[in-house]
Structures are given as C-alpha cells and as structure tokens.
Amino acid sequence: MQNFANAAFPPDTVEAMTSALHAALATLPEPVHSAHVNILAESILRTAKSGERDTGVLKRIALMELQLTGRA
C-alpha cells in the first residue's frame, strides 16, 4: 500500500470514503481477495486526497482502477 501517513481527512470525508469502499466491495464476487481490498482502498484514498468527496465517484473510480489492473 502506498504511504498515506501524512493524509488527513475530516470526519465527513472519512465517512464518504468508508461508504465508497463498502459499496465497491459489495459489487465483488465472494471471496473478496485482500489484494482487491487494497487496490480499492488505495484508489479511494488517492482520489479523496485529490479533492473528490462524492461517494459514488469514489466508488466508480476505485472499481475502474481495479479493472485496469487486470485483477478483477
């Protein structure tokens, strides 16, 4: 996982990121691999760090990045 040690987010952004991750994970078939969780989480963190706050957008970008890695 990339280093996000210096990233700080307000509570409402953390809530949006958490919701986006849960929503993205819910679309994946069971069992969900930890590598997929990491890819989704990194994408959501990176996208939120760039300023995006919309849960739907965070989810869509994360799922697109997962597909692009060829690991979906």
Image (spheres, rainbow, N blue to C red):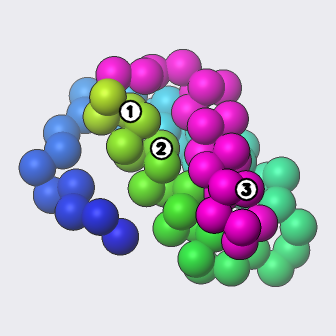
**Contact (CB < 8 A) between labels 2 and 1?**
yes
Tag in front: 3 or 1: 3
- x and y percent of residue 53 in the render? 45, 21
Give the Cα separation between the discs numbered 2 and 1.
6 Å
Q: Measured along the vertical axis of the image, is residue 8 above or below residue 31?
A: above
Viewer-closest of 35 and 65? 65
Local secondary structure at mark 2: helix
Give the Cα separation between the discs numbered 3 and 2.
14 Å
**Contact (CB < 8 A) between labels 3 and 1?**
no
Residue where numbered disc 1 is placed: 48
Side of 26 where 47 appears, left or right: left
Residue 22 counted in the magenta span = no
Give the Cα separation between the discs numbered 3 and 1.
19 Å
Q: Measured along the vertical axis of the image, is residue 49 above or below residue 45?
A: above
Type of the residue with mark 1: Ala
Q: Residue furthest right?
A: 29
Q: Residue furthest left?
A: 6
Residue 23 seen in this snapshot: yes
Residue where numbered disc 3 is placed: 67
Type of the residue with mark 3: Gln
Residue where numbered disc 2 is placed: 44
Specify the segment rendered in magenta. 51-72
- x and y percent of residue 69 in the render? 63, 63
Q: How packed is label 2: few (under 14 Cα within 10 Å), some, or many (20 or more)?
A: many
Local secondary structure at mark 3: helix
Residue located 33% across and 22% down the image: 51
Residue 54 counted in the magenta span = yes
